[in-house]
Image: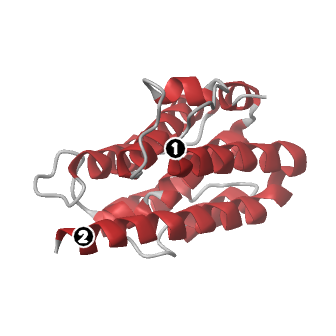
Amino acid sequence: MSLVELIAQADERGLVASGLACLDRCVPLLGGDDDLLRPLWTSLADPAGDDWADRLAQVRGTLGGTADAPGEAEDEAVRLARRMLEAAPARPAAAEVRVWADACSVASLQIHRMLDLVADEASSVDARREGRTQGMSPLVAAELRRQITVLELLAGRGAGGLRPALEVSTEGRRVLRAVVSRRARGRV
């Protein structure tokens, strides 16, 4: 099943986890530490989920800046990551969350495509999301697999899929942190 189909079929929790996982993997671009989004993950596990808005505001306050802040290290990639955070809905309601999760999916794949040293043969990430994977660059392929895995975990396990989804996201964050670090060393 393609990523587009998985997003279309996901329930509210799966959509929030999908968007949050994409954002979580891109935190190294924003200068956030590894536990920055942990309170939002915890909020997803809470059946009431009443503290999502407060925790989201805290994360935004911690990171500061806007998507159009000048002088960022990876300019466009950083702007895309900031937009993911800024667009996160204050209340995870189904319609808003579906749009956000879809946008986060696209942004995260674009970020990985920009940062990959190997060129991706597709003209856009849309082809990748629809299942056309021929000639895909390694970093984009890994991100696509992670996005699919997160959605499958939540679809198959419900709230029980949150911990393994977080583990998948953590792995991806480490990979992106290494890529960003390697690129920074190359500029010095």
Q: Are marks 2 and 1 in contact (CB under 8 Å)?
A: no
Q: Is residue 89 visible?
A: no
Residue shown at 67%/27% (left/top)? 131
Residue 186 image label: 2
Q: What amino acid is labelled 2 in the image?
A: Gly
Find disc 1 in the rendering and name its residue.
137
Tell me where residue 40 sits by quadrant. bottom right
Sequence order check, earlier mark of 2 and 1 = 1
What is the secondary structure assignment of the residue under circle 2? helix
Q: Is residue 28 above or below residue 157?
A: below
Residue shown at 52%/66% (left/top)? 175
Residue 46 location (% of width, % of height): 72, 61
Q: What amino acid is labelled 1 in the image?
A: Ser
What is the secondary structure assignment of the residue under circle 1? loop
Q: Residues within 10 Å of mark 1 (few under 14, many from 20)?
A: some
Distance, label 2 to label 1, CA atoms, is 20 Å
Left or right of residue 82: residue 47: right
Q: Residues within 10 Å of mark 2 (few under 14, many from 20)?
A: few
Residue 115 location (% of width, % of height): 37, 52
